[in-house]
């Protein structure tokens, strides 16, 4: 039987340097490298089982945060945007990703003084929400608006507080339905959408990776999972608890290209 993928998922390996990762909101805790690698392997296997062809782009050993590949690019049907990550230490991560993406999409590059992390960009149909954070600045958002206007996307800046990225606070779990932590982003920023709120005891649970009708979601958040399942959604839990110590979650470990 031949396997016809629904998506190409670009990933990067966990490097030993992850113990020196960027941290903004969390205190540094020891990361068990072997466990982080094994959790990342399980994540990739789950994506493969949900119809992704995995393409691993080898990271340099000294790149601490390369596994969080989502931050390096934004993939749309018509083009891909290579970001300029907000953290100086992460700027070298984009080149190898651009080299692969150029085979799939025309590329646009975010330029100095703009900065954007992919984790700040939430796409819902033709609406694109860009988090205003320490990583994504006004120049980055206006360059993104300019790049996407010809393809008919509307880009709106969204205030975010208390977390690293917009997609730490809100992700799309079905057409017109957003999973949100209302303490970190305001429902009013998303007029016309319906919402599932995270369980108040699980503030980090708003990050879900949507692959068609399937949702990949952190196994650490059973009460929020129950809320998603109550909406009739198909949730596939995966434990990324070691990468969570580096402020990573399910969306940030892949770049999804519909094929
Ligand atoms: C960073 O601070 O850049 C990394 N330690 C974590 C990045 C997580 N990325 C994401 O959620 N998109």
Image (spheres, grey):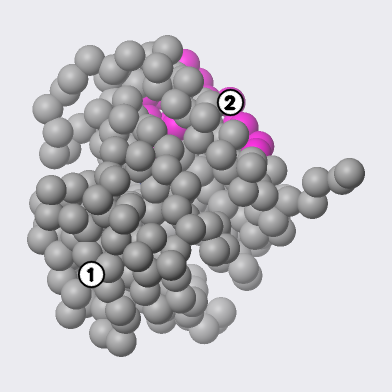
Which part of the image, by quadrant, shows the N terminus? top right
Residue 197 horizontal/vertical position (percent): 22, 64
Mark number displayed over residue 17: none
From the viewer's perspective, is residue 221 above or below residue 235?
above
Which part of the image, by quadrant, shows the C terminus? bottom right
Residue 72 placement, left or right of 190: right
Residue 204 horizontal/vertical position (percent): 22, 47
What residue is rendered at 53% in x and 57% in y? 214
Q: Which element is circle 2 on?
A: loop
Mark number displayed over residue 58: 2
Residue 24 horizontal/vertical position (percent): 16, 38
Q: Is the residue under label 1 in contact with that under label 2 (CB below 8 Å)?
A: no
The mark total stands at 2
Between 93 and 193, the one nearer to me in the picture: 193
Between 68 and 134, the one nearer to me in the picture: 68
Between 108 and 167, the one nearer to me in the picture: 167
Residue 167 horizontal/vertical position (percent): 31, 56
Please tell me in which quadrant of the rendered image residue 127 appears.
bottom left
Q: Which residues are magenta?
A: 54-68
Q: Which element is circle 1 on?
A: strand
Please tell me in which quadrant of the rendered image residue 250 appears.
top left
Report if residue 196 is visible in the image.
yes
What residue is rendered at 56% in x and 52% in y? 256
Residue 42 falls within the magenta-colored stretch: no
What residue is rendered at 37% in x and 74% in y? 177
From the viewer's perspective, is residue 256 above or below residue 193?
above
Magenta span main SS: loop
Crowdedness near tag 2: few (<14), some (14–19) or many (≥20) residues, C-alpha within 10 Å = some
Residue 61 falls within the magenta-colored stretch: yes
Q: Which residue is mark 1?
A: 158
């Amino acid at each position: 039987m031949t396997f016809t993928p629904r998506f190409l998922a670009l990933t990067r390996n966990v490097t030993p340097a992850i113990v020196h990762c960027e941290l903004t909101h969390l205190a540094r805790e020891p990361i068990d490298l072997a466990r982080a690698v094994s959790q990342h392997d399980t994540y990739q296997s789950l994506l493969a089982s949900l119809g992704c062809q995995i393409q691993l782009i080898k990271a340099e050993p000294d790149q601490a945060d390369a596994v969080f590949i989502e931050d390096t690019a934004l993939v749309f049907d018509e083009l891909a945007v290579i970001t300029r990550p907000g953290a100086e230490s992460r700027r070298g991560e984009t080149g190898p990703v651009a080299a692969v993406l150029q085979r799939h999409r025309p590329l646009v590059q975010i330029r100095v003084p703009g900065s954007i992390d992919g984790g700040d960009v939430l796409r819902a149909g033709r609406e694109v929400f860009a988090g205003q954070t320490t990583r994504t600045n006004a120049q980055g958002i206006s360059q993104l608006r300019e790049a996407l206007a010809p393809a008919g996307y509307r880009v709106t800046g969204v205030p975010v507080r208390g977390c690293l990225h917009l997609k730490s606070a809100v992700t799309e779990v079905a057409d017109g339905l957003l999973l949100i932590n209302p303490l970190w982003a305001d429902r009013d920023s998303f007029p016309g959408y319906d919402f599932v709120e995270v369980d108040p005891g699980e503030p980090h649970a708003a990050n879900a990776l949507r692959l068609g009708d399937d949702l990949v979601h952190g196994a650490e958040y059973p009460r929020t999972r129950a809320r998603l399942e109550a909406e009739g959604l198909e949730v596939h839990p995966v434990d990324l608890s070691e990468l969570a110590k580096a402020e990573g979650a399910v969306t940030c470990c892949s770049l999804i290209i519909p094929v």
